[in-house]
Amino acid sequence: MSATTTLSAAAASATTGHAQWSSRMGFILAATGSAVGLGNIWKFPYMVGQSGGAAFVLVYLACISLIGVPILVSEWMIGRRGQKNPVNTMAQLARAHGHHRNWALVGAIGVLGAFLILSFYSVIGGWALAYMGDAASGSFSGLDKAAIGAAFDNFLARPGDLLTWHTVFMLLTVGVVAMGVSAGLERGSKLMMPALGLILVVLVGYGATTGSFGEAAAYMFNPDWSKLDGKVVMAALGHAFFTLSLGMGIMMAYGSYLGEDVNLLRAARTVVVMDTGFALCAGMAIFPIVFANGLDPAAGPGLVFVTLPLAFGSMSGGLVLGTLFFLLLTFAALTSSISLLEPVVELLEERTPLNRIGATVVAGTTIWALGIAALLSFNLWADVKLAGLNIFDLLDHVTSKFMLPVAGLGAIVFAAWKLEQRSVQRELGLGVGGFRLWTLLARYVAPLGVLFVFWNNL
Ligand code: PHE
């Protein structure tokens, strides 16, 4: 690592008293916690199943290595150089390199994206909490498909219940974030991530005893090349972006707490391997249960909240396994939600007189209030629509289709075209050949890939 960047980062944290991760492992677990979320457990498995099995997995791995990793590393690098919240970091780096101050917008769009996403992410986190309670109390047992589907619909129709669980979930998120970077985010991830891994091992282990493990493996991994088309590639690319929590100021914020001793490329490899591992294992936990109970693996969005409860309600040990599964989902959602709140809190802390706790409470309360509008889309405000979308869907669309790609693109373009490249090479610790490859990916392949997705969304 270069002496100049070491010094400037150390000087920055000495003068601002900016928080730091207490260990490299803590940082990696927190970043992995952000990456591993509902996308891995609920979405990835059914995407694989529907989109060509191993063929899809290969395309996804290519997207994540060629596009995801360069953006992830760029966001960390920018954050680490700035040592501030994403807006100030971008503004400061732009100024230092003689570029227009509007680059700060890249940080602002990211933080705003995180703010908006958390409002509805917390609503779904609340569902996971509620279903954990239902699973533990045996509410699913003996219900048939129609009854389980109706139970989910009725749950969504009751604003009071949704509000309660959204509030509890948000309180948990605020509680962790208020404690700070190392005592809150880092410690929370160090506790929840191993628990997440353990629960997944237990569930995959159960899957192996069902007799449908082979069928599940075939569903997930047998390559069906005929299903690969432009749409599938687009979906793989979009998911690679979402699952690494890119374009939300999260990884920039996490980079700003990072010391100079961490090798960014190696850290990215670890996060990607763990993220993909969790996603693949989630499939091997879910599909054996689905097949063993003769259910539909392609149920899409209803897979987790309708199909699985049906299975848990009818199998022996379903009480324990169901509770564990929804605990898994809750932890996965919580380690992501704390990462969504962090850039917003970092911004408030550094740009207002609020301290850490005050900033967390203000940010959390505002996001919670917006979440109420999101949860009312399922019942009282179902007819409140803009461009044919209710508030929940609108928040989802605007963020994932527009804000995230723009902020992610801005980050990589800035890192690859606007930063002084010799220092980037030194920071990444790459030789001539390696840096040439990096430049090719960061300057051309990754930006074009994101543009392609973005254009497709329009
Ligand atoms: N990366 C998380 C997942 O795969 C989703 C997420 C999105 C988390 C945005 C934080 C921010 O589910």
Image: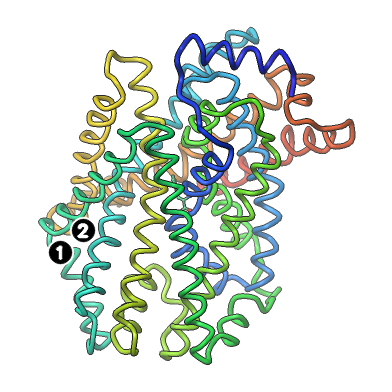
* Residue 195's disc number: none
Give me the C-alpha separation between circle 1 and circle 2: 6 Å
The answer to which image quadrant residue 234 occupies is: bottom right
Which amino acid, mark 1?
A: Ala
Q: Residues within 10 Å of mark 1 (few under 14, many from 20)?
A: some
How are the colours assigned in the image?
rainbow
User: What residue is at 73 percent from the left and 26 percent from the top?
Assistant: 427
Which residue appears at 39% of the width and 37% of the height?
114
Position of residue 222 measured from the top left corner of the image (x, y, whole percent): 67, 79
Question: Disc 2, ligand 1: is the CB inside 8 Å?
Answer: no
Give percent across and percent down for residue 77: 63, 28
Instruction: Decide if residue 438 is on the left or right side of residue 213.
Output: right
- Disc 1 vs disc 2: Cβ atoms closer than 8 Å? yes
Closer to the N terminus: mark 1 or mark 2?
A: 1
Please identify the quadrant where the N terminus is shown: top right
Q: Nearer the viewer, residue 21 or 229?
A: 21
